[in-house]
Amino acid sequence: MTQSVNDTLLQEEGAIECTVAAGRSVISLHEPITMSARDQASSVLATVLIAARPVTLDVTGAAEKNPIARSFIAATVHACKEAGIPITVVGAPAHIRSTQAA
């Protein structure tokens, strides 16, 4: 059963969506992700850090070469690790998945 977080955040062109499923915060990226997503990304990241649930970051919908998406992925992995929150990145090429090990 999937339950939406009260402040699931979607933007008009592309999206960063945060939901809760099986006790995990699930962040999904959808193209196009542009600079206008900066505030949205900050809100989603704050939401998952406050919830302190394990995180699944689904990047299947993000373009591999999108620097904004890559930056969000790196920031999310880093913030979760700093907070001691387990994070799993799914749907990513090997070079992005390897950031989990760093």
Image (tube, grey):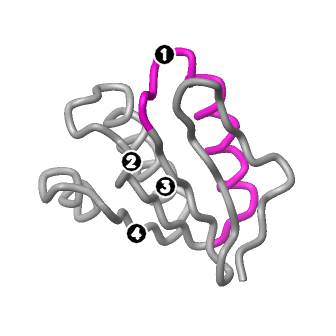
Residue farthest toward the right in the current orientation of the protein: 6
Given contact means CB atoms under 8 Å apart, are the residues at marks 3 and 1 in contact?
no
Q: Quadrant of residue 21?
A: bottom right
Find disc 2 in the rendering and name its residue: 61
Q: What whole-number distance in Å separates the C-alpha atoms at marks 3 and 2? A: 26 Å
Give the extent of the magenta segment. Answer: 31-53
Q: Position of residue 38 (x, y in %)?
A: 56, 23
Q: What whole-number distance in Å separates the C-alpha atoms at marks 1 and 4? A: 24 Å
Q: Secondary structure at mark 2?
A: strand
Disc nearer the start of the sequence (1/4): 1
Mark nearest the camera among 1 and 2 is 2
- The residue located at (61%, 44%) in the rendering is 45
Q: Position of residue 70 (x, y in %)?
A: 31, 36
Disc nearer the start of the sequence (2/4): 2
Label 2 sits on what residue type? Gly
Q: Position of residue 29 (x, y in %)?
A: 47, 45
